[in-house]
Image (cartoon, grey):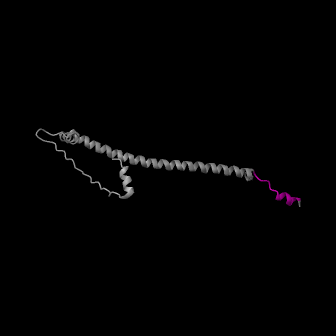
Amino acid sequence: MQYYQRKGKIKKKWYQTPLALIVSVAITGILVSSSAHFYDAFRQTRIKRVEAEAKLTELKEHRDRVKTELAALATEAGTERVLREKYRVAKEGEGVVVIVNDKTETVATKPEKRGIVGFFERLFRME
């Protein structure tokens, strides 16, 4: 009988103890948390990279536009065009015409109120 009782009490190894289980769960939690942090940083970096590539494309297009404008300014006709546009300069014998649109706005008037309310509104109106 003693043989069976001893056999029933198997000695646990160190990795089968509750403390080892708690430690392994804690380590697993820390690793999962840090990997989530690294994934978030990776995602933010990817978003910023896409934004930077879009900005680079925009700047390259701007550079190309500026280069074409500079090439146009290098010629005499391009310089003359810019002077005429910006400073409204004319050659000898030419005149500069400036067209101004006459915009007259019509203001709709409200009908005057009658009675006591209309009297007090006209009395205290600031004109």
37, 13: nearer the viewer: 37
Tell whether 46 sits left or right of 5: left
Image quadrant in which you'd find residue 98: top left
42, 122: nearer the viewer: 122
37, 28: nearer the viewer: 37
Image quadrant in which you'd find residue 74: top left
Point out the image quarter for the N terminus.
Answer: bottom right
- Residue sticking out furthest to the right: 1
Tell whether 29 sits left or right of 8: left
> Count the marks: how many?
0
Image quadrant in which you'd find residue 110: bottom left
Q: Is residue 36 above or below residue 1?
A: above
Q: Is residue 9 magenta?
A: yes
Tell whether 103 sits left or right of 46: left
Q: Residue at x 65, y 49 (%)?
A: 27
Q: Residue at x 44, y 47 (%)?
A: 49
2, 57: nearer the viewer: 57
Tell whether 89 sits left or right of 9: left
In percent of width and height, residue 94 lies at 12, 41
In percent of width and height, residue 58 lies at 35, 47
Q: Which residues are magenta?
A: 2-13
Q: Is residue 71 magenta?
A: no
In percent of width and height, residue 73 lies at 22, 40
Q: Residue at x 34, y 45 (%)?
A: 60
Q: Is residue 122 above or below residue 70?
A: below
- Residue sticking out furthest to the left: 93
Q: Is residue 9 above or below residue 30?
A: below
In percent of width and height, residue 77 lies at 18, 41
